[in-house]
Amino acid sequence: MKLRPVPGGSLVLILDGDEAGMLDQLVVQLIQLLQSHSGTSMDPDPLFASLEVGGTEETPDDPALARLFPDAFEDEADASRFRRVSEQGLLNRKLQDAFEVTSALGVDTLRGFGGEEDEKTSVEVEITPASLPAWVRTVTALRLAIAARIGLESDADHARLREDEETRGTVLVFDWLAAILESVLAIMVGRDGSADTA
């Protein structure tokens, strides 16, 4: 992974072919996870999709979804009411973000991923101030989902899981995503001291 600042407050994220393929695969898996919990087809208009009212009343059984859509209130009844009207809009927003990231990575350019030539072919993706929030939210969602899947909640968990052969690879991916996120933010936020990633 390399980063190259460009004029206009943007930067170019340069990934090896295998890195780009892995990131794209993770984002596609996130999209599939979100779609499995969606109760409706997403409105093609981004604004209406993000404001759509609807959702379930209970915390998802899947630990990754539960981490991505936590209860907003301690009181069970209040949490249920809020989830019922807000969850679908939040889910649609996460889907929009993920689609933006995978589109920027360019699935077609990664065709044949895994071959020797592809691993040597770098993929360059421009991240602009406008697209930065989608990248931050998507990479953060990936890390939250991964952490929930393997039970990573503390530094002690991280150290333990990294020593376990069954989870070491997943922890390394978790750390790699953190490195991407921190590096991108260090450059783009460091330029003017602020960035709207909410």
Image (cartoon, helix red, strand yellow):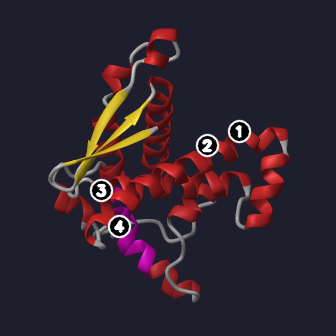
Amino acid type indicated by mark 1 = Gly
Magenta stretch: give its range: 82-94
Q: Earlier in the sequence, mark 4 or mark 1?
A: 4
**In x, y percent, where is residue 104?**
28, 38
Look at the image and tell me in which quarter the C terminus lies.
Answer: bottom left
**In x, y percent, where is residue 113?**
47, 18
Q: Are marks 1 and 3 in contact (CB under 8 Å)?
A: no
Q: Is residue 142 magenta?
A: no
Q: Is residue 92 magenta?
A: yes
CA gap, disc 3 and disc 2: 21 Å
Looking at the image, residue 117 lies above or below residue 127: above
Residue indicated by mark 2 = 173
Residue at point 44% right, 37% down? 28
Residue indicated by mark 4 = 54
Q: Are marks 2 and 1 in contact (CB under 8 Å)?
A: yes
Looking at the image, residue 152 lies above or below residue 17: below
Residue indicated by mark 1 = 169
